[in-house]
Image (cartoon, rainbow, N blue to C red):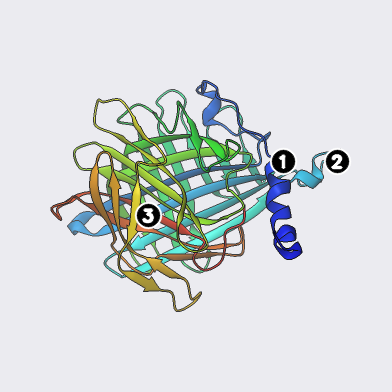
């Protein structure tokens, strides 16, 4: 028989399961679904990539905007009620300098300070922005060059080279064993990058490269047993795109896995919960948070067996000043079963320094 303590420990999970509702399958509509969905609790636009400057200097970059609905203020009629919060993270990985630079921002929506358009991708937080041009489909990301003490700035353009990639089942992506754990989710891999990256004390660098954009929105993303996730999005040199993720329990076991594969010109192959296996390799321990991050992974998928390997171990971001999380997110290489580098992209790991709470 379960003990009283055990029963009480289960109550939060049971209450969550009873209150959570499954997202209905629906056909995503564009350009509307490029925009914000304030009726759902959590949303993010996430763009990462690798770039090269003159002389072969290699850099990674991340620009992410988050939107969070504040449930307690929704009934309030005051224009000053903080009904939606916007967060932004930006980072540059300088492989030559062996350094990660990152900054964060937070503001409530409104008053000309922060906004997320519902018509198309147009997210702004002070002088940071990510916007899509409806005529060309190109994105523009701006992170002010004088942003914070880290001293970096981004002015980058992203041109689609492939159709949208709808993740999961036509854009409805399961994230756990219960149907309520799901998100609407699409990606734009193989974006052609052009623009400028500025690092304090150095001349601005003109860069070109490839990027990956994710847009995801949900009401209840994580199962109560999940403490975080491991995710990778990889642009392969031949034009293919690999997504792989897993939601992870406190003991390190997989609660749910998924992902997709698309060869150039081909259809999306969605991975089911039995199709992907993550095996951790080398671990890097953060001297700041104490988090121990596997910076090398073997990932087995129906599309093949791959190795994801960090190109700089210390790519940990402390976002306790905005979203509240400490996580690892960084530029990584993708290698095939023979050890050949076949692509580049980003690896994200959350819940290692402390359990993630959305």
Locate residue 157 relative to residue 96 in the image: left or right. Answer: right
Label 2 Cα crowd, 10 Å radius (few <14 / some 14-19 / many 20+)? few
Q: CA distance from mark 3 to mark 1?
A: 33 Å
Marks 1 and 2 sit apart, C-alpha to C-alpha, by 26 Å
> Residue at horizontal 24%, vertical 50%?
306
Q: Quadrant of residue 33?
A: top right
What secondary structure is marked by label 2?
loop
- Looking at the rendered image, the disc whose residue lies closer to the viewer, 3 or 1, is 1
Q: Residue at x 25, y 39 (%)?
A: 303
Instruction: Work out whether residue 204 can be spotted.
Output: no
Q: Which residue is mark 1?
A: 18
Disc 1 crowd, CA 10 A, few/some/many (<14, 14-19, 20+): few
| Position above or below: 77 against 310 | above
Nearest the viewer among 319 and 305 is: 305
Which residue in the protein does label 2 denote?
A: 76
Q: Which mark is residue 347?
A: 3
Quadrant that contains the N terminus: bottom right
Q: Is residue 126 above or below residue 266?
A: below
Q: Earlier in the sequence, mark 3 or mark 2?
A: 2
């Amino acid at each position: 028989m379960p003990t009283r303590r055990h029963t009480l420990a289960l109550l939060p999970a049971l209450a969550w399961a009873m209150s959570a509702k499954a997202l209905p399958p629906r056909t995503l509509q564009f350009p509307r679904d490029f925009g914000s969905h304030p009726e759902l609790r959590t949303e993010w636009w996430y763009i990462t990539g690798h770039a090269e400057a003159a002389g072969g200097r290699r850099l990674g970059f991340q620009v992410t905007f988050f939107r969070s609905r504040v449930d307690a203020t929704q009934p309030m009629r005051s224009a000053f009620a903080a009904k939606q919060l916007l967060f932004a993270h930006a980072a540059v990985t300088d492989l030559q300098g062996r350094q990660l630079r990152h900054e964060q921002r937070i503001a409530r929506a409104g008053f000309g300070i922060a906004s997320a358009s519902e018509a198309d991708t147009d997210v702004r937080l002070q002088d940071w922005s990510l916007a899509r041009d409806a005529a060309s489909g190109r994105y523009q990301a701006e992170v002010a060059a004088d942003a914070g003490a880290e001293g970096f700035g981004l002015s980058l353009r992203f041109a689609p080279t492939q159709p949208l990639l709808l993740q999961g089942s036509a854009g409805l992506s399961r994230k756990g064993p219960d149907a309520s754990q799901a998100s609407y989710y699409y990606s734009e891999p193989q974006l052609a990058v052009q623009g400028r990256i500025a690092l304090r004390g150095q001349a601005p660098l003109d860069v070109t490269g490839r990027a990956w954009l994710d847009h995801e929105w949900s009401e209840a993303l994580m199962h109560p047993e999940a403490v975080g996730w491991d995710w990778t999005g990889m642009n392969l040199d031949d034009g293919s795109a690999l997504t792989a993720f897993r939601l992870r329990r406190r003991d390190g076991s997989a609660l749910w896995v998924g992902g997709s594969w698309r060869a150039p010109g081909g259809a999306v192959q969605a991975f089911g919960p039995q199709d992907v296996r993550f095996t951790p390799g080398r671990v890097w321990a953060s001297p700041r948070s104490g988090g121990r991050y596997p910076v090398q992974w073997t990932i087995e998928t129906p599309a093949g067996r791959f190795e994801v390997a960090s190109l700089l171990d210390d790519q940990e971001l402390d976002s306790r000043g905005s979203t509240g999380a400490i996580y690892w997110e960084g530029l990584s290489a993708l290698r095939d079963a023979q050890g050949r580098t076949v692509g580049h992209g980003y690896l994200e790991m959350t819940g290692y320094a402390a359990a993630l709470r959305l």
